[in-house]
Amino acid sequence: MIKDKSFGSKTFDVVNTILMIIILIITLYPLLYVLAISLSSTEYVQANLVTIIPKGFNLQAYHQVFADKYFWVAYKNTILYTVVGTVINLLLTSSFAFCLSRKDLIAKNTITILVIFTMFFSGGLIPNFLLVKNLGIYNSIWAIVLPGAINTYNMIITRTYMQGLPEEIFESVRIDGGNDLQIYSKIVLPLSKPVLATIGLFYAVGHWNAYFYPMIYMKDKVKYPLQVILKDMIVEQDFSGMEEMEALGQIPPTSDMLVGASIIVALIPILCVYPFVQKYFVKGVMIGSLKG
């Protein structure tokens, strides 16, 4: 039988619920406002009459964004960089974390200290740029996906999770003649789905939103990812087709409408992916952090 909650417990629940509702409103309001701006007509936006509900519904801003000649090329590039980069991230991070999680690894503590050292100190932008150029991967997909192939924070979460896996399972595989590669591929990876889904989402979001390093390492516009193209649209107001609309006597969308449409377009793929890994998200992070 469940006992009635005390007055303090009820008060805590009420305060907690109110606080969560306030945070939810603060979080959602900017997104809803941007969505409403992107779906409203130019007249209402210019008159500053739009709140979180679209007025004079039209998709003119989205047509303008989609009409950009580099938009779909950049979309394809972003998907390619995200998929290839995330696969490489997960493969290298999980294999490195598995090695560091083994008790019999030689110089384990020294390697761990060296790895953690990279969390606080790095070579800097210019040495990294020279390294990428001397490796011959400048202006290619590998300049985007290889320099950050292993994130130390994500690797430590994964290592901590793998350290909690039952050692008896590994011993039984060794008794049956299995080696470390078989343990990693057939035992560790299937049992690590929660943490791999979690860090996979971290990596995928990072690749999807990346614009600084692609802007540094890419010189051909046809190789730009979506975020760099969106940055050009938002910062430089570099939209194609605006002159044609004005020549036809049509009122072009405002910069706020174009910025809103660009942000929504960039958000949609990640919003679609998140529900599929959400069930692993909290579990993976909590298990990896509590046992650190």
Image (tube, rainbow, N blue to C red):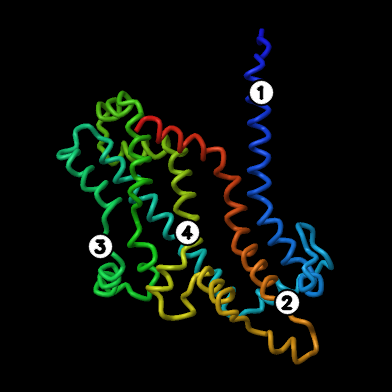
Q: Which residue is mark 1?
A: 11
| Separation of marks 2 and 1 at Cα, in angstroms | 49 Å
Sequence order check, earlier mark of 4 and 1: 1
Residue at the image point whose x is 28% and y is 64% from the top: 124
Q: Amino acid at mark 4?
A: Val
Q: Position of residue 225 (x, y in %)?
A: 49, 70
Q: Nearer the viewer, mark 4 or mark 1?
A: 1
In this picture, is 132 found above or below 243? Answer: above
Q: Which residue is mark 4?
A: 83
In this picture, is 166 found above or below 219? Answer: above
For residue 253, the mark is 2
Q: The residue tagged with tag 1: helix, strand or loop?
A: helix
Q: Quadrant of residue 105?
A: top left
Badge 4, how many Cα within 10 Å: few under 14, some, many 20+?
A: some
Q: Are marks 2 and 3 in contact (CB under 8 Å)?
A: no
Q: The residue tagged with tag 4: helix, strand or loop?
A: helix
| Separation of marks 2 and 3 at Cα, in angstroms | 44 Å
Q: The residue tagged with tag 2: helix, strand or loop?
A: loop
Badge 3, how many Cα within 10 Å: few under 14, some, many 20+?
A: few
Taking depth in this image into account, of 291 and 8 the one nearest to the observer is 8
